[in-house]
Amino acid sequence: MPPSLAVDLAPGHKTGLALRNPVMTASGTFSWGFEFAKQFDINALGAVVSKGVTIAPRAGNQQPRVAETPAGMLNSIGLQNVGLDEVITELAPKWAKWDVPVIVNVAGDTIDEFGEMAAALDGLPGIAALELNISCPNVDIGGIEIGQDPEASARATRAAVRNTDLPVIVKLTPNVTDPVKLALAVEAEGAAAICAINTVLGLAIDTKRRRPVLPRARGGLSGPAIKPVALRIVYDVAKAVRVPVIGCGGIRTGEDAIEFLMAGASAVQVGTATFADPRAPLDVLDGIEAWCAREGVEDLREIIGCALPAPV
Amino acid sequence: MNVSTATLLSTEPAWDGAFVSWFHAPELARGVEPGQFVMVHCSVEGLDPMFARAFSYYRVDGDRFAILYQVVGRGTRWLSEQPTGAVVRMYGPLGKGFRLPDDPGNLLLIGGGVGIAPLVDTAERAVAAGHHVVAMMGARSESHLLSAAAWPKEVEYVVVTEDGSAGAKGYVTQHLGKYQEWASKIYACGPNPMFQALADTLRFNGRRQRPEILMEENMPCGWGMCYGCAIFTKHGVRLCCKDGPRFNLFDVY
Ligand SMILES: Cc1cc2nc3c(=O)[nH]c(=O)nc-3n(C[C@H](O)[C@H](O)[C@H](O)COP(=O)(O)OP(=O)(O)OC[C@H]3O[C@@H](n4cnc5c(N)ncnc54)[C@H](O)[C@@H]3O)c2cc1C
Ligand SMILES: Cc1cc2nc3c(=O)[nH]c(=O)nc-3n(C[C@H](O)[C@H](O)[C@H](O)COP(=O)(O)O)c2cc1C
Ligand code: FES
């Protein structure tokens, strides 16, 4: 018997968010999914998360947009995307033909925009849930400013939840002293699940030019380098909230994913690893299955949160 | 695209600081268009450097293919030091390559530095399809030139060096001369300043040749996932790896 890998990321919600397995893609590291679908079986994945969408199309930031770092990268892409209208008219109908649930990552400039976008995406075939990106470090307005403030994060969550029947996942920034405060604030406003983490603020210097490599100086660090930070935050958040937690940050093997599940994540997102190895999400899934078989785990839910301290 | 491993068959110097490496990998050598590229991992465990490096296909021969590369940093150095028989992780072929005209014509290929890499295969195919080919190669000096023997014998090979140690002195774009009028189609690969100079030279009399260029940008993924390789064209932002690396010169410059 192969192990049961199914998880539900929105058990209390009216539509739920049932995944065949816990391996998702991370927003902004998978484009809109079509490149992958051309090469591999996209329906093998647990869920797909789209690039961050803004109301108007965006061209993104100037070059250089990325700087490679040991076991990771700094990015400053700047939310290049086709805009909400094209997602609704062109992309969602294509997603509707897939079996795999597609989650749209939405990035509002203001609290109201989160409500506006949630309303526009509500009830569209091809969209299974929303993920609020209140944590992008690479834009001038919105993004991380909202995500670093529990009060603003709560209001953005409320705006979205009130305007859609879809489950709303809220994605947290690690760039705060206490991510648990953010998690509790968005849970209280109806977040169906919490995703942790977005990129870690970082910097690289070009010693020849004696200037930061990236034009906006700071960038978002991702990849295996941030895995311990992500694990710590998932562990702390999972201890504090009742809703499911999605782990993200530096995952590239099945063993990495198992660590996140043990720290309390119900699912994982694979991001930067996919850049280096196109098969990464599939390899993570195979790795989880192999680990379960080896360890005699019949249902993945047996190990979710098993590394957390016993409740008092 | 195929994700695979390739076995290193040989590495020979091409010029000062540049090498040609031949690999055996049937899935990576199949269906390659001239100007397409392959992403090569230049570390064993894939953590540092984490991302694969992009290289144009230099030559393709059955189950084997070669890349021609200049050692500029850690990845290319690592590659140049691998022993024969080494197994290297890669994925490809990727990107959009050159489109050769249907009717036989006069093709001018212009290469700057290691930008010569994709042009030899292009020349071979063009000759086989009945085109006349002139290849102009710009290099720093005589010791940075690809041997004339690397080209098909039907190709007229014109050399320009910055210091005049071989061929005409200066930049290729200063020596287009009669070839500019002769050419019915132009293909180029090299550094961005070369494209700029080419555009400035051809803007008033050469637009009819609709030059195609192969561009470079930092490519973490090479397959349209990261949006790191943006090229800002006159028609909006494009991804070098997926929408390119072939662009129309005058769409960018
Ligand atoms: C589509 C495409 C095809 C290419 N084909 C060839 C080829 O056929 N032969 C060849 O020698 N090189 C080619 N390149 C460039 C090659 O990818 C870089 O030289 C290589 O990535 C450098 O890796 P490294 O680890 O040695 O250098 P690093 O240590 O990463 O960097 C060394 C220096 O090179 C610069 N650099 C790094 N990556 C790139 C890049 N992608 N483009 C421009 N500069 C870069 C860095 O800014 C730095 O100054 C191609 C690039 C692209 C995008
Ligand atoms: C190039 C790039 C673009 C990203 N774009 C987005 C985005 O649009 N929305 C978002 O919520 N997160 C975005 N992220 C963050 C990732 O989804 C993920 O949270 C982060 O990279 C950590 O995971 P990883 O180490 O597996 O990549 C982006 C990350 C990268 C590297
Ligand atoms: S290199 Fe990643 S999108 Fe082009």
Image: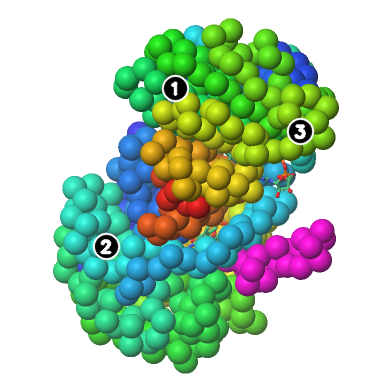
Q: How many marks?
A: 3
Q: Nearer the viewer, mark 2 or mark 1?
A: 1
Mark 3 belongs to which amino acid?
Lys
Give me the C-alpha separation between circle 1 and circle 3: 24 Å
- Chain letter of disc 3? B
Q: Chain of mark 1?
A: B
Examine the structure image and report whether residue A219 is included in the region drawn in magenta. yes
Quadrant containing the N terminus of chain A is top left
Can the viewer see residue A61?
Answer: yes
Callout 1 touching callout 3 (CB < 8 Å): no
Q: Nearer the viewer, mark 2 or mark 3?
A: 3
* Contact? badges 2 and 3 (CB < 8 Å): no
Q: Is residue B172 left or right of residue A275?
A: right
Q: Which residue is mark 3?
A: B169
Secondary structure state at the residue bearing disc 3: strand
**Quarter of the view holding residue A233:** bottom right
**Real-space Cα distance between discs 2 and 3?**
53 Å
Q: Which residue is mark 1?
A: B106
Q: Residues within 10 Å of mark 2 (few under 14, many from 20)?
A: many
- The answer to whether marks 2 and 1 sit on the same chain is no
Question: Which stretch is magenta?
Answer: A199-222
- SS of the residue under disc 1: strand
Alpha carbon of mark 2 to alpha carbon of mark 1: how far? 44 Å
Residue drawn at x 65%, y 65% is: A214
Dot 2: element = helix
**Can residue B63 be seen here?**
no
